[in-house]
Amino acid sequence: MAKNTICLWYDKDAESAARFYARTFPDSAVGAIHRAPSDYPSGKQGDVLTVEFTVLGVACLGINGGPVFKHSEAFSFQVATEDQAETDRYWNAIVGNGGQESACGWCKDRWGLNWQITPRVLTEALTAGGVEAKRAFDAMMHMTKIDVAAIEAARRG
C-alpha cells in the first residue's frame, strides 16, 4: 500500500466504482479486495469491506461504509486532457454511466464522486493572465463540458 492513499467512502459499491475507473482511465487498476471475515451489524461474512485501486496512478482505498457520508464538491479528481477527443471520452464515460453534468468542466459519477475534466488549453489560458485569461474564463462560465475550440477562439479574441 502507498504511503499516502486517498480513502473514498462508498455506500456499498466501492468495487463497482473501482472497476469502472480502471476501465475508463489509463494507469488505473483494481488491487486487493478485502472481505468481512465474519458477520457484522450491517453486513455478513464475505461482503466487500475495502478495495485498493489506483486512478491515473493515484493510490486510493474505497471503503463500503454505508449511507452515512456522501461525496461533495469539496473533493474532486481533476483530469488534465490533451484535446477534445480525450475530454469527450472521459466526460461521456462518467456521465454516460449514470453520472451527472455540472458546470465549467465538472461532472459527478454515479457514486457521487466529482470530476473536473479539464483540457490543458483551458489551464494554459487561465494561467496566461490578462485579457486572454478573462476571455477564456468568461467562455468557460457558460459551458458544462469544456469545448476546446471555443476556449481556443476565446484566447485569440
Image (spheres, rainbow, N blue to C red):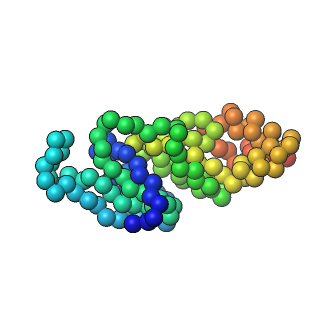
Using residue 25 as the reference point, say whether residue 110 is left or right of it: left
- How far across and down, in percent of the image, does residue 105 sit? 61, 42
In the image, farthest residue toward the top: 142
The mark tally for this picture is: 0
Using residue 96 as the reference point, say whether residue 42 is left or right of it: left
Q: Residue at x 41, y 49 (%)?
A: 8
Vertical placement of 95 versus 38: above or below?
above
Looking at the rendered image, the quarter that the N terminus falls into is: bottom left
Quadrant of the rendered structure where residue 140 is?
top right
- How far across and down, in percent of the image, does residue 98 sit? 41, 41
Q: Is residue 128 visible?
A: yes
The answer to which of 85 and 73 lies nearer the viewer is: 73
Q: Residue at x 31, y 36 (%)?
A: 67
- How far across and down, in percent of the image, does residue 65 sit? 30, 44
Vertical placement of 13 versus 54: above or below?
above
Quadrant of the rendered structure where residue 142 is?
top right
Q: Is residue 26 visible?
A: no
Q: Residue at x 19, y 54 (%)?
A: 36
Quadrant of the rendered structure where residue 21 is?
bottom left
Q: Residue at x 39, y 42 (%)?
A: 111
Using residue 78 as the reference point, say whether residue 40 is left or right of it: left
The answer to which of 95 and 110 lies nearer the viewer is: 110
Vertical placement of 23 versus 123: above or below?
below
- How far across and down, in percent of the image, does residue 82 sit? 66, 58
Looking at the rendered image, the quarter that the C terminus falls into is: top right
